[in-house]
Image: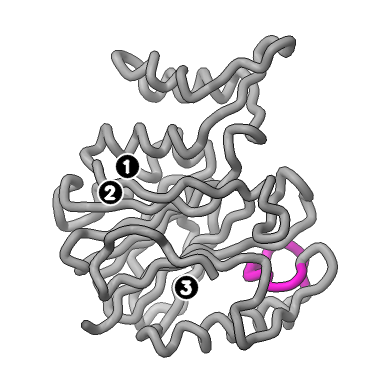
Amino acid sequence: MIRAAWPAPDNVVALTTTRHAPAGTIGASEGAYADFNLAQHVHDKPLAVAANRAALFHQLQPQGLRRIQWLNQTHGTVVYRPRADVQALPDADAAITTDIGQALAVLTADCLPVLLCDRLGRQVAAVHAGWRGLCSGVVANAVAAFDRPAQQLMAWLGPAISPQHFEVGEEVLQAFECQFAGPDTAVIRAAFAPITGHAGKYLADLYQLARLQLKSLGVAAIYGGEYCTVADEDLFYSYRRQPQCGRQASIILLRDN
């Protein structure tokens, strides 16, 4: 597992799993999903996913874990608030909580996971930000859901596809330009590097697009963004590299001080 490298309060636990089982455990997934897939929707064996999720739960229990909230991610903008008495799998791409021991998880295999907390360690959020969700405002919705102003928040950008491997078409650039028209248009365009000899094709910087949005919202403390799910084949699943693959989870929770 990869711990978030950020100056979050001591009671905030933030991490991303990899395709390898945590030390002391054995991953149950095989083949293209080997060995620690945590997603139920990718046609892996259900018993293998259940075993991996149980191993993850056991691994995090000593850090105060009581529950994990999973989401049915739809590339949308809904922010869900978990309740202990509701065992639901909501259609949402972000979750936020103030509950001690309530972990929030998002699954990715190239999309960008964004973990958020306030500087006092009283509230946390997890966001699944593919380019569609990012463009539509899922990060903005998550920031707005906090009880505290954006200036008091910090963000960690988990493993995602790097700009060296994220080829997109003109429609993606235009979608961001339309959504963020005005003085930000030039800044947004700078996150799309034209591919020489391929008109209408760009290498998009998902990390930079997220940073620009967070800064525009007032979140100045932004960390992470140094991994590439495509290039780091030994560490991460990548849909762009191999469509039949598992998913890693980015998780955040509050524990007792």
136 up-or-down from 118: above or below:
above
Cα distance between the residues tagged 2 and 3 = 23 Å
Q: Residue at x 48, y 24 (%)?
A: 191
Residue at 30% from the left image edge and 71% from the top image edge: 12
Q: Which residues are magenta?
A: 34-44
Q: Which residue is mark 3?
A: 88
Query: Which residue bears the numbered disc 2?
Result: 143
Disc 3: CA contacts within 10 A as few (<14), some (14-19) or many (>=20): few
Q: Quadrant of residue 187?
A: top left
Residue 40 visible at all: no
| Chain-order first, disc 2 or disc 3 | 3
Dot 2 amino acid type = Val
Spatial CA distance of label 1 from label 3 is 24 Å
Secondary structure at badge 3 equals loop
Q: Is residue 250 magenta?
A: no
Q: Contact (CB < 8 A) between labels 1 and 3?
A: no
Residue 39 on the magenta segment: yes
- Callouts 2 and 1 close, C-beta under 8 Å: yes
Q: To which residue does mark 1 refer?
A: 140
Whole-percent x, y for residue 232 in the image: 67, 52
Q: Nearer the viewer, mark 1 or mark 3?
A: 1
How many other residues sit within 10 Å of disc 2, few (<14), some (14-19) or many (≥20)?
A: many
Q: Say the numbered circle drawn on residue 231.
A: none
The number of discs equals: 3
> In the structure shown, which secondary structural element does the residue marked by tag 2 occupy?
helix
> Quadrant of residue 209 in the image?
top left
Expressed as whole percent of the image width and height from the top left, the position of residue 101 reads: 34, 81
Residue under the image location 61 percent in, 15 percent down: 194
The answer to whether residue 79 is left or right of residue 3 is left
